[in-house]
Amino acid sequence: MQTACVFVYLYFWMFKIVDFHKISNNFVKGLETITFVLAVLGFTYLLKDVQNGLGFNEFVASHLEGISWLNGTTLPFIVFTLVAWICWATGSNWGIYAILVPTTAILSTQFHANFWLTQGALASGTVWGAAACFFSDNRVLTAQSCKVDMMKHGISQFPYQLIIFVTSSVVYLIAGFIL
């Protein structure tokens, strides 16, 4: 990747496609932007490793065994609804997704649920939570790019997000019984 960056930088500079100062400024802005994302992803994987080292996945699975209404058919529905609201409340989606992938994998195996449906419910829940959250990164970027107030944008979109949530919840519940 570094070789490609250096090649493109030199190519644009040598053939005068972009002014040297302009490409340098954009290169620095790009580094500033990606540094935060890389730091968040790095800490996410660190937390995932710490979680695995502490035995968090097995702990959660063992404590959920005694719940009578939690079974292979309801697990995708429960994963979707819980993760969606956790992501909505925290504004985080990738961190929660990375941390919960092993846990949902263990739970789907333990409860004999459809593995891919449960993982899909996890991914869908994190995406819904990030899209519906009033202060998530994609809400901020959308509001900035459209030049609208972030809270007004969030409030105007929330009823549609609730329709998506209810529809998805029902579909995951039905799919849990069918698959």
Image (cartoon, grey):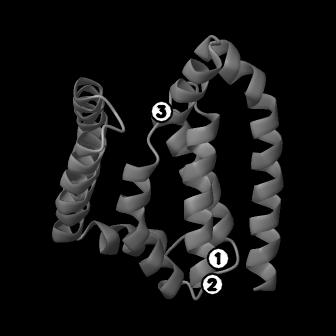
**Residue at the spot x=61%, y=69% of the render?**
120
Say few, some or many: other residues with alpha carbon within 10 Å of mark 3 (under 14 / 14 to 19 / 20 or more).
some
Residue 141 placement (x, y as % from top left) = 52, 28
Query: Please, which residue is most extreme toward the front here?
Result: 15
| Marks 2 and 1, how far apart at CA | 5 Å
Residue 27 placement (x, y as % from top left) = 25, 35
Residue 118 placement (x, y as % from top left) = 59, 73
| Marks 1 and 3, how far apart at CA | 26 Å
> Mark 1: which amino acid?
Leu
Instruction: Name the residue that disc number 3 marks.
Output: 137
Instruction: Name the residue that disc number 2 marks.
Output: 114
> Mark 2: which amino acid?
Asn
Residue 139 visible in image: yes
SS at mark 1? helix
Quadrant occupied by the N terminus: bottom left
First in sequence: mark 2 vs mark 3: 2
Q: Are marks 2 and 1 in contact (CB under 8 Å)?
A: yes
Q: In which quarter of the view is residue 57 placed?
A: bottom left
- Camera-side mark, 2 or 3: 3
**Residue at the spot x=56%, y=61% of the render?**
123
Q: In the image, is residue 52 above or below residue 22? A: below
Residue closest to the eye, 35 or 139 = 35
Q: Which mark is residue 117?
A: 1
